[in-house]
Amino acid sequence: MVNHSPFHCVQTAPIFVGLDNATLEKLTAISTHQQRYAAGTTIYEAGSDVDRLLVVDRGRVKIYRLDENGQEQILYFLEEHAVDSEAALFTDSIHHNFAETVEDSLICSIRKNDFQQLVRTTPTLAVSLINNFGNRLTDLENRSARYGTLTAHDRLKKYLEDTSEQIGSRYFKLPLSKRDLANWLSVTPETLSRQFTKLIQEEIIEMQGRMIKLK
C-alpha cells in the first residue's frame, strides 16, 4: 500500500490548492487522517450536526437526499481528494443530505473548532474556501446544462464518453452500480437497461457485467 502523506493529502485537496507551505503545515497539524469506512457505510445523515470538513483520500462517496417517497436522489459524488462539508468550518448547522461510501474509502477531516482557531490568524484560508464554493456551483450548473436537455439514450452515451475521458481509456469498469447510475442520470433502472441494450445493438459499446468498451 502506498504510504499516506498527511501534508500531501491537505495540499492536493482542491479547496487548499495554492496555499503556501507554512499554512498547509498548520492545516496538517490540526487534521485527522485515513479513517477507514467500508463500502456502504453512512458517514453522515440528514439532521446530524455539520462539525467537520471531509477530504476523500481514497475511494468514492455519494451525496444524496431522500424524496417524499423515500427514494434516493443522488446530488453528486466525491472522488479522491474531493472536499465536502465546507460549511462546517464557519457555521453551526445540520446536514440536509446523506453521505455514503460507494467503495471502501479512507477519509481525512478537519474539525470546525480547530479550523476556526487557525483561520483567525490565516485569513487566506477563508478566501480559498469562497473560491471553492463558486467552483462547485459552476460544476453543478455545467452538469445540468450537459445532461438536462438530452434524451435518456444520449444522456447515457454522454456519461460513458465523459467517464472514458476522465479515466483515460476506452475500456473501463463502470464506477457506479447500475442502480446508482440510473439515479445519477435521472432515469429508471429499466430505462437504463434498455439504453445499454440499444447502445450495444448500435455497436457503440461492448459490455460484460460492469466492464465497458467504447468503440
Image: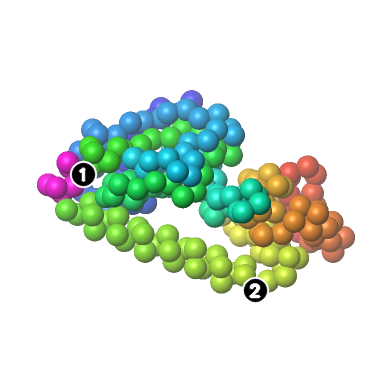
Which of the 4 image quadrants contains residue 39?
A: top right
What amino acid does circle 1 point to? Gln
Regarding residue 87, the answer to whether it shows in the image is yes
**Rendered position, 75 above or below 80:** below
Report whether 107 appears left or right of 102: left
Question: What residue is shown at x 62% (from left), y 70% (from top)?
Answer: 148
Compared to 129, does 107 lie above or below? above
Q: Which residues are magenta?
A: 116-122
Residue visible at 87% across and 60% down in the picture: 201
Label 1: which residue?
116
* Disc 2: CA contacts within 10 A as few (<14), some (14-19) or many (>=20): few
Question: Which three-letter amino acid code belongs to the residue tagged 2?
Answer: Thr
Q: CA distance from mark 2 to mark 1?
A: 42 Å
Picture coordinates of residue 115 (x, y %)? 23, 42
For residue 170, say whether it is visible: no
Is 118 included in the stretch rendered in magenta? yes
The answer to which of marks 2 and 1 sits earlier in the sequence is 1
Q: Position of residue 155 (x, y in %)?
A: 69, 65
142 in relation to 102, above or below: below
Q: Quadrant of residue 49?
A: top left
Residue 149: which numbered mark, if any? Answer: 2
Q: Measuring 59% from the left and 69% from the top, which residue is drawn there?
A: 146
**Camera-side residue: 22 or 124?**
124
Q: Which residue is at the far front?
A: 68
